[in-house]
Amino acid sequence: MNNIILSSRKLSKSYIDGAAKIDVLHDVDLSIAKGDRVSIIGPSGSGKSTLLHLLGGLDKPSSGEVCVDEINWQKINEKQRCQLRNQSLGFIYQFHHLLPEFTALENVAMPLLLAGLAVKHAEKKAQEMLDHVGLSPRVSHKPAQLSGGERQRVAIARALVHQPQCVLADEPTGNLDQTTAAKVFDLMLELNREMNTALVIVTHDQQLARRMDRVMVLHEGALSNEV
């Protein structure tokens, strides 16, 4: 039985800068199965964030393909892409990207509301997810009232509340001190095990990267397994 939930084949991305063509990624092949834990490392400017955006359907490749649940991003329209993204993927960024005017509960409920769930049910699921990440006392607080670690835990809860098949995380602990970063990373791995949601993390932190099951290196546009 095929349990691949996210894959890329011969994925390439280039940009035109004046008269020059800049190749960022070329012929990237990647397969992510349910429950996988994969880290992608590489020097700054190597294209790690670009790769994550392509995998998440947030950017279009120059060539090649990305499939989620065997659905090719390029063969569906924008509305269908939004629906597939909201249904199958979760996103965590270095900066939490929480909506400042909304409470933790409202921020976490947002993906469910966008999917059409009734407010009452969305808030119930959001409350359960915030309980799960240890933020029960903080559900009515807005982002400005939370610490950096708490904000990132809210972001994790938001990414997982709709039980996606895969979470794409771009430097999820990069804005935190070392102790808080380790605690947030522990939480991500714990939820990965409990929910069997695949986890793909782009990080500069070699120590955190090597806690994943598979470490991949992006170098000069090519992706390979770490030797």
Image (spheres, rainbow, N blue to C red):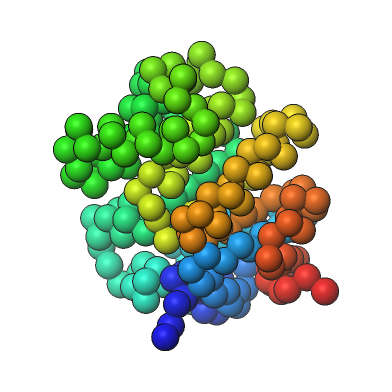
Residue positioned most to the top: 145
Total residue callouts: 0
Q: Please tell me whether residue 209 is drawn above or below residue 142 in the rendered image.
A: below
Which quadrant is the N terminus positioned in? bottom left
Depth order, front residue of 163/5: 163
Percent position of residue 123, x then y: 28, 32
Q: Write down the quadrant of residue 185 in the picture.
A: top right
Residue at 46% x, 55% y: name it. 195
Depth order, front residue of 35/225: 35
Residue positioned most to the bottom: 1
Depth order, front residue of 21/75: 75
Percent position of residue 63, x then y: 49, 74
Residue at 55% x, 79% y: name it. 10
Q: In the visual, does 81 lie left or right of 131?
A: left
Percent position of residue 121, x then y: 22, 37
Q: Please tell me whether residue 9 is drawn above or below residue 88 in the rendered image.
A: below
Q: Please tell me whether residue 204 is drawn above or below residue 67 in the rendered image.
A: above
| Residue 59 visible within the image | no
| Residue 227 visible within the image | yes
Which quadrant is the C terminus positioned in? bottom right
Q: In the visual, does 147 lie left or right of 113?
A: right
Residue at 68% x, 65% y: name it. 213
Depth order, front residue of 76/148: 148
Q: In the visual, does 119 lie left or right of 129?
A: left
Residue at 44% x, 33% y: name it. 130
Percent position of residue 125, x then y: 31, 39
Q: Write down the quadrant of residue 50 in the picture.
A: bottom right
